[in-house]
Image: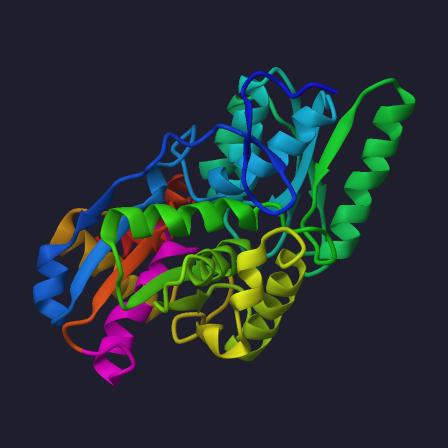
Amino acid sequence: MPLHPKVARINHDAMHPRLNIVTAPTPLVAAPRVSRALGIELFIKRDDLAGPSIGGNKSRQLEYYFGAAKAEDADTILITGAVQSNFARLAAAVARAEGMHPIVQLENRVPDTSKTYQSSGNVLLSRLLGAEILTYPEGEDEAGADAALHARAGDLRKAGRKPYVIPLSEGHPPLGALGYVDAAHEVLNQLGEFDVLVVASGSGATHAGLIAGLRGAGSRARVIGSCVRREAGLQSARIGRVVDRLRRLHRGAERVHQADIETWDGALAPGYGRLGEPAASAIRMLASYEGLLLDPVYTAKSFAAIPALVASGEIRKNSRVCFVHTGGLAAMFAYEDTLSALA
């Protein structure tokens, strides 16, 4: 079957269809005031500007999922995420742009949320994009959430539709990680060699893709994943499993060793989607020093790693550091009460 006209192929080992979603390269900007305050040379990779509807890092992952969906001539996209999922909102936006019907299944991962959390931010944007919204009651049952979507996809097939499920659980080929293999090469082309890259680490596709992309290109830069969903030991094991599956898609992943997988969970508490003091301080720092915003779920917790690890000596003074801003800013509006306390 011929590929959709907008789908291009990239020279990964097994040629994978890719839909052009991101206007690349995204900007890489210096952060001079934070650099002076911390005694490092800090750059920010602005993947918050990647893709449609306020953007975010998941746009890079979606390039490969939508490439596969287009290659299968799909007319419906099904995806699961947390209530304030950037992934789901971006998938809905891309689906609409491609003339496909988006079905978004939202899990309850964050306890005791407000009415604003349940209806504003990414939820509101997904509704404005015309997504069909489903709910799944468990926030820690990835396999069950996927099974629910596959059941819905089965019903759609019986009705003559052509659905494509973007998986949440482990055990599937990590197509989305290929988007961050590409991003790693992009950073190297923009910045050259550097010492440390810091990124949020959740599902693991972004984190694993960056390590594989850097090692495949011959870079020895450290990649530190700041945990947003589970503690460091569990997250390191998850990243290792993603890398194992990625080896079947991209040869550079064969150069990743266990020692390359670094995680930090100093800003994880009090849990996924909830804001602790290290993350709150990170929001204040980047806003007041550089005029840039961080979201409470991912980027505040990932940026918090930088001052903490500089203070502990894990990131040495004068190091050249790249922070990947993965976006998620639409979710800020769902956290109005929490963020108002910082203003």
- The percent position of residue 115, horizontal first and vertical second, equals 51, 43
User: For the view shown, which residue lies furthest in the bottom direction?
Assistant: 312
Range of residues picked out in magenta? 294-316
Residue 204 makes an appearance in the image? no
Quadrant location, the N terminus: top right
User: For the view shown, which residue lies furthest in the right direction?
Assistant: 158
User: Which colour style is shown?
Assistant: rainbow
For the point 43% across and 28% down, the residue is: 52
Q: Nearer the viewer, residue 78 or 285?
A: 78
- The percent position of residue 119, horizontal first and vertical second, equals 52, 37
Please give left or right for residue 144 compared with residue 202 in the image. Answer: right
In the rendered image, residue 30 lying in the magenta stretch gets the answer no
Q: Is residue 32 above or below residue 334?
A: below
Residue 338 makes an appearance in the image? yes
Please give left or right for residue 231 compared with residue 315 in the image. Answer: right
Q: Nearer the viewer, residue 103 or 206?
A: 206
Q: Nearer the viewer, residue 154 or 126?
A: 154
Q: Is residue 80 above or below residue 206?
A: above
For the point 52% across and 26% down, the residue is: 93
Please give left or right for residue 113 compared with residue 65 in the image. Answer: left
Q: Quadrant of residue 77?
A: top right
- The percent position of residue 160, horizontal first and vertical second, equals 87, 17
For the point 50% across and 31% down, the residue is: 124
For the point 11% across and 72% down, the residue is: 39
* Count of numbered badges drawn on the protein: 0
- The percent position of residue 113, horizontal first and vertical second, equals 52, 53
